[in-house]
Image (cartoon, coloured by chain):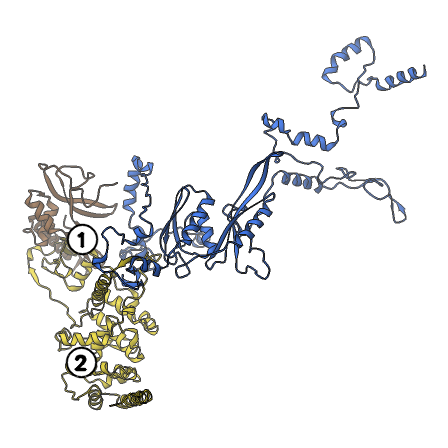
Amino acid sequence: MAKQLLDITKVFQKLTLNSTRLVTSPLLRLHDTNVEKNAFPTIISIRNTSFFNKLPADHLWKGVTTVSNAGKKRGRGKTISKKNIKDLNRGQSLGMGKANMVWPGLSAPIIRGRELVQQQKLPEDPEREKKLIELRNTMGTFRPTKLSPMERGWSGSKMPGRSIGAPDPIGEETFEGFDTRVLELKIVFNMKGNFGRKRRNAALVVVGNGRGLGGFAMGRAQEPKNALRKAKNRAAQKLVHIKLFKDHTVCHHFFTQFGSTKIYVWQKPEGYGLRCHRAIKTICEVIGIKNLHAKVEGSTNVNHIMKAFFLGLVQQKTPEQMAEEQGLHLVQFCPESNNFPNVIASPTECKEEKDLVRNETFDFNHYCFGGKVVLQKKHPAPFYTKLDSYMEHLRRCERRRNHDEVKLNLRSEYGEIRSFLTDQHPECVQFKKLKEEETQEAET
Amino acid sequence: MGTVSHVLRSISSKNFFLIGSRRCLNYSAIQYDGTADPAPLFFNDEVQSLLRLLTRVDYNKVFRKRKLGKNQLSDPEYKFMTDAELKESLKEAQKKADELLQIPPVVKIDFGKQRILSKDPALNGISTSRLVFTDITFGVKDANRLIVVREPDGTLQEAEWQLKKRMNQLYFPTPGRLLKPPRMFEDNYLESLLDRQEYEFILDRACAQFDPHEEEYQRIASITYQHLNEKNSFDKLRSTRHFGSLVFFLVWNKNVDNLLLDLIETSNIFEADKLVTLYSQINSVQVDGDSDLNRVENFIKTYANKKGALELALQSYKEIVKKQKEVEQGINIAHGIPTS
Amino acid sequence: MLPSASGTGIFTSNSPKVIRLLRKGCTNRPFYHIVVAVNRQHQSRPIIEQLGTYDPMPNQYNEKLVALNLERISHWLGNGALVSKPVAQLLGLAGYFPIHPTSYITAWRNRQVLEKQSCKDGPESVEEDGRVVQ
């Protein structure tokens, strides 16, 4: 009996009398009219348990900000991005609100010194809201750390092309003057019997001292950092010596191939720079080649490019070797020195005209490239050259074609753009737009 | 050799005149504008070969690397060659060197003549300005190009040489030559160039800009030669095409002491003797002697202006030769080789 | 590409040809090419060949410059090309043709003008009248 009574009181507790009719939800309005008719107090039920208070906050957050794996496969949660997710709790703490109240025991100590802290309202902080908004604005936009231009790789702060320092010392051998550059950093998978796909990072790096020593290696590890370290240290143990011509370029033109990656490399004079694929450029910088031109034909897989290029470098011959092999003098003709025959290397015994076999190759370029010829693609004329407006443009340009030179000559002769007629006709000078200050001065 | 005025006073020749009107950098222009014509002497084969010999050709200097005015060096060309081919290409290079070292002609100042083609008084007043007609027919040499002027008074005549040069440059530009002479030949700029001893640059540019018979060319060249002679920097012009004209200039003006001193000091007694021969040929004087040394000695005694310095240098040269001989003999004795 | 200013060399064998002036330059700055072109053809059409130039404005040395490719001019004259009056005057003054009568008339008129002016202004200030050939 007593239990029944208790239940009833509980039910009555849940029922509230809506005599003031302050709550007028549209759904309840119809009900309200009935209430008016019947003059019976309206009963609104309140559920104290709901989706929001059944689950902890982090679960709720997870529900909003992530998608289950199964859901992702079905294409759910496409609009969820880190940009839109903002933690509104950040920058706020319990007891500190818009109204700048002091709550002893919550946002302030109960006793300060010997005095009891009183609950009181302080004047509002106008900056608080602004600071919060600022904080929230920065939250969604993630910016990777900005590198100095010298540290950047091929593409911003991505690893390929970046330097990761000298290899770790082995015993007493400290790799002084060495540098390591990353060529590739990628995620690779292999299948395991019990795990399925196993994900690792593979790094391809090249190590060199800038004076003709170079080596490359690939390292794999769970973490990119470890993969890079592994690769770097392994590359340091595989150094090869590379012959350089006058310490700035390759010994001669050469053709080299690995798989379907074919590379034509040209020796170039000082001041030319490195004009080639970025991977080749990075390798050259590390090894110490400063001038070279290279053309990659076929696949541009970085791994293959590097292997092909190193093969070519290692197989280079010195001028003496070439002269000895051909049994002929190797002579250089420089337009700068008026094509004076400069003998680079001579064989111990030179062949004579009658000794030369008819179909032997004597052309130096032919000899260097092994008879290969570079594919020279013909560029089609730009589309706009067929337009009528282009003809009009040419006609207008023709009129102005020597103006720059004439202006330069006039400047050197008179110090300004004027004609010899200017002495007689002072108005014959180029119109000069005055600056604001000058015009004001002129007016006054 | 102190001041240039001293030099000029020491020179007593009927072959040159001082031009007082154009003075630059304490030097007076000495031009070939007297009665005597240097051309027949200069083009004499013997004189030419002597001048070539004194130029002392060094292929490393002739074919040294120069900038070609491009942004970058051009690719060198490599060739495989047999001995015979190499020899042939070296011979070609030698021929090219001969061309590069061709001495700029030394000739008298020549203003040319203006031929009057027709006089037509009925055309008087045809125009207020002159009408210049240039024949631009393809393949005609600049010297032979037909350039005529119709004067406002109706006369048709050949153009004067300045106008001819201007028209040739206008319609058929010579590389390296400007329509107006560059500023570097103005006195103050020329002075700074001379101070930097850029003799080859000045003379090369002058050769490109002017013709050898022009007054301006001879003025610039003579000033450069005098400056160089005073500074004793003969090595700057050795192995260049201008050394021959320099030697000819010095010999013509009887001012070879510095060059002779330089040759003796560097123990080039053979060349010194050739210089004396050149002197005797151009100034038609007789220098006797049975050996190189003897002839040079005789020349110094009779014709040199700076006898003291030259004799001293010759003395020290003789001593060096003597010591060398002694050392050689000593070595021979030490090696047990009988000496004659 | 634009047709070359030195001429295309394209013509039909029996077309009438004329050696004439072709105005280049711009507003207030005339400059002429001496060209051989098809007679009565519009001046904007490509020409057969350029034979010279004529600058009617005196330069700083008070010279009017005329360039003539006499070899090609004789060639075209031999092929029966006509010569326009201004070109004939220029060739006459160059000594290649006999002097054109118009040149004599121009010279005479210029002299008349000068005389009149000298009478009017007095002998001390004679302004020259810049009469040109055409």
Residue B278's disc is 2
Residue toward you, B319 or A364 = A364
Query: Gap in Å between the C-alphas at discs 1 and 2?
Result: 60 Å
Question: Which residue is pictured at 81% across the width and 15% down the height?
Answer: A43
**Chain displayed in brown:** C
Decide: few, some or many residues near mark 2? Use Cα within 10 Å; few <14, some 14-19, many ≥20. many
Q: Secondary structure at mark 2?
A: helix
Query: x%, y% of residue A342?
Result: 29, 63
Of residues A298 and A361, the one nearer the viewer is A361
- The chain that hosts pointer 1 is C
- Tag 2: amino acid: Leu
Residue B329 in view in this figure: yes
The quadrant of the picture occupied by the C terminus of chain B is bottom left
Q: From the top left corner, tell me how far across and down residue B262 is, in percent.
A: 28, 82
At horizontal 45% and vertical 42% (from top left) the residue drawn is A301
Viewed as shown, does residue B150 lie left or right of A320? left
Q: Position of residue B11 (x, y in %)?
A: 22, 84
**Residue B150 occupies quadrant:** bottom left
Find residue B331 and name its label. Answer: none
Q: Position of residue B245 (x, y in %)?
A: 21, 74
For chain A, give the colour.
blue
Disc number for residue C130? 1
Residue situated in front as seen by the camera: A57 or A168:
A168
Residue type for callout 1: Gly
Up-down: is A309 above or below B178?
A: above
> Disc 2 is attached to a residue of which chain?
B
Helix, strand or loop under label 1: loop
Of badges 1 and 2, the one in the foreground is 2
Colour yellow belongs to chain: B
Q: Is residue B339 above or below residue B235?
A: below
